């Protein structure tokens, strides 16, 4: 086995680590030890992990090493250290969902995503901090500490998969699995300068994942490169009889078209919405990304979406009513065990009317129909992931334009709400930095079950740019 | 996360119901309807957020009540890819 220094080793991408292990040029034990050492070094500053599996990860890594040296290949993630958001069940290991209520929950079964990753050979190094019960976008967790952004630890990592975003960017794991209801994979991916996929609703099983809003919940990969996300995604996407909402639609080889480029692809933008109401550095960076893809051969097409306004209200209504249904018993029996913000949101969710909820669900059909019509003219859409860069930890307001303070929860979902409501897949890809060195991300939105095109475009962009190769000085 | 917020109201005029301005009474009433115990302090906090959200929620309801949307179902699950949109 080759010997590498820890910094060099940790800068490898997940895909590079997987290839080196398969070629027996890198030891799963060495890479796991390096990862655990990195976690020990950075976690006191970031609070990215709730639980770290020191002993178990090394045991699995030793087994992975024995197997690879004996010629066995467990799968695409053989011996690769990754981490899971702590609302994804791990059999016999604490799964808190970032809450006090589930602080001591030891699941009897793995989530489907967990078991599929195990079968693919992954080494789990720990469970990641998050916004309590995934109901919020800051990861300012009152029970396990506020997660901090590795690019500036005074800033937030977004959420709700904030621990995943921070850990991947800080080289404390090579990839992570997050969950996304209203933006919880894409927002921390953009804010921490990494890649994250919200799959088509129903593409990935939610079995064994603590729900937020059943009709919008998804699980997806987060990593530093598009290739890494595609590699992880292929190992757990696909039908699952244990999840009644999981679609029986064939998956693809998500690595096959990564090198196909963007020539001839039609990229849609929605005038009056996608480049509207943005912090100037975000506008400049996302527009530059669009020009980069255009220069590489893509065609940019303006496509109006008549009823795109109103999506944030629909998002808030659904994302309130469904969690309040799931939490109804606990909210009555253990209200003091919730953080203040989540308790308030759960209370409000009980006060919305059934007609509000159902009209919001019908609005989703309206918006989806308009997007599907638009896909006759374009192959994908491009917009910012969110309209601002990382705010200070603890902030509940954000200034986007003209010095006007806005509520964080509504503002943060300006662009991520569209795929969440329509069920369409969306990929966050880093595309720049603001003047303070804070990451900016763009969002690619695709046709249903066409994650492969999103990976193709994201990979083409990363082949032309170097934003994803930058590392925070932590 | 802030307990006070607003939601974009959509493309219409944004005229909200007068009742949302009296959220101090609205929240306890709705909580009682759901048999959710709520102190006066909690009702004030939750009522403020509810008041911020209700105008946009009501405007969305008005939009979706329009005759041109009568046939829309509250079903949003994709069960298959969409080959009909190719090209």
Image (cartoon, coloured by chain):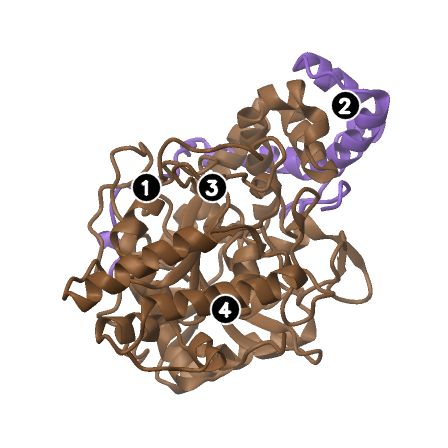
Secondary structure of the residue carrying numbered label 4 = loop
Q: Chain of mark 3?
A: A
Task: Say if residue A370 shows up in the picture.
Answer: yes
Give the color of chain A as drawn. brown
Residue highlighted by disc 3: A364
The picture quadrant where one finds residue A59 is bottom left
Dots 3 and 2: beta carbons under 8 Å?
Answer: no
Badge number at residue A273: none
Q: Is residue A174 above or below residue A140?
A: below
Secondary structure of the residue carrying numbered label 3 = helix
CA neighbours of label 4 inside 10 A, class few (<14), some (14 to 19), many (20+): many
Q: Please identify the quadrant where the N terminus of chain A is shown.
A: bottom left
Task: Give how far apart the Cα atoms at labels 3 and 1 are.
Answer: 27 Å
Locate residue A125, reporting x and y percent. Answer: 44, 56
Frontmost residue, A204 versus B83: A204
Dots 3 and 1: beta carbons under 8 Å?
Answer: no
Locate residue A31, reporting x and y percent. Answer: 39, 69
Locate residue A367, reporting x and y percent. Answer: 46, 47
């Amino acid at each position: 086995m080759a010997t590498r220094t820890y910094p060099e080793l940790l800068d490898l991408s997940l895909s590079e680590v997987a290839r080196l292990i398969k070629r027996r040029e890198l030891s799963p034990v060495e890479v796991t030890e390096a990862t655990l050492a990195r976690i020990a070094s950075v976690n006191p500053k970031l609070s990215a992990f709730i639980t770290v599996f020191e002993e178990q990860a090394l045991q699995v890594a030793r087994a992975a090493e024995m197997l690879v040296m004996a010629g066995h290949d467990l799968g695409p993630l053989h011996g690769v250290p990754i981490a899971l958001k702590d609302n994804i069940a791990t059999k016999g290991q604490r799964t808190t969902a970032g809450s006090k209520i589930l602080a001591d929950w030891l699941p009897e079964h793995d989530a489907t995503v967990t078991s599929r990753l195990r079968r693919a050979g992954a080494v789990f190094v720990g469970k990641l901090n998050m916004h309590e019960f995934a109901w919020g976008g800051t990861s300012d967790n009152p029970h396990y500490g506020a997660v901090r952004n590795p690019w500036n630890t005074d800033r937030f990592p977004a959420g709700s998969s904030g621990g995943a975003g921070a850990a991947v960017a800080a080289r404390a794991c090579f990839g992570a699995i997050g969950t996304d209801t209203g933006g919880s994979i894409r927002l921390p991916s953009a804010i921490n300068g990494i890649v994250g996929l919200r799959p088509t609703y129903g593409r990935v099983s939610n079995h064994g994942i603590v729900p937020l809003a059943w009709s919008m919940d998804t699980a997806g990969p987060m990593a530093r490169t598009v290739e890494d996300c595609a590699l992880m995604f292929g190992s757990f996407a696909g039908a699952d009889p244990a999840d009644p909402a999981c679609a029986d639609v064939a998956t693809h080889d998500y690595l096959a078209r990564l090198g196909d480029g963007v020539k001839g692809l039609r990229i849609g933008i929605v005038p009056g919405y996608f480049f509207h109401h943005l912090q100037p550095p975000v506008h400049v960076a996302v527009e530059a990304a669009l020009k980069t893809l255009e220069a590489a051969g893509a065609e940019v097409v303006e496509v109006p979406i008549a009823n795109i306004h109103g999506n944030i209200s629909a998002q808030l209504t659904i994302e309130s009513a469904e969690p309040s249904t799931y939490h109804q018993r606990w909210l009555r029996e253990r209200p003091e065990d919730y953080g203040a913000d989540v308790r308030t949101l759960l209370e409000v969710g009980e006060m919305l009317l059934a007609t509000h909820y159902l009209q919001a669900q019908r609005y989703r059909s309206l918006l989806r129909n308009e997007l599907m019509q638009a896909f006759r003219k374009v192959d994908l859409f491009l917009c910012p992931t969110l309209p601002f860069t990382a705010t200070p930890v603890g902030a509940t307001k954000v200034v986007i334009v003209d010095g006007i303070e806005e509520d964080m929860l509504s503002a943060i979902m300006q662009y991520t709400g569209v795929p969440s409501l329509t069920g369409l897949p969306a990929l966050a890809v880093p595309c720049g930095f603001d003047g303070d060195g804070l990451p900016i991300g763009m969002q690619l939105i695709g046709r249903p079950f066409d994650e492969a095109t999103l990976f193709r475009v994201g990979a083409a962009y990363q082949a032309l740019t170097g934003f994803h190769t930058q590392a925070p000085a932590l | 996360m802030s307990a006070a917020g607003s939601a974009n109201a959509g493309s219409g005029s944004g005229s909200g119901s007068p009742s949302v301005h009296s959220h101090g009474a609205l929240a306890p009433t709705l909580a009682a309807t759901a048999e959710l115990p709520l102190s006066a302090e909690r009702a004030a906090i939750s009522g403020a957020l509810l008041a911020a959200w209700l105008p946009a929620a009501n405007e969305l309801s008005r939009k979706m009540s329009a005759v041109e949307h009568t046939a829309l179902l509250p079903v949003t699950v994709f069960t298959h890819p969409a080959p009909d949109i190719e090209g």
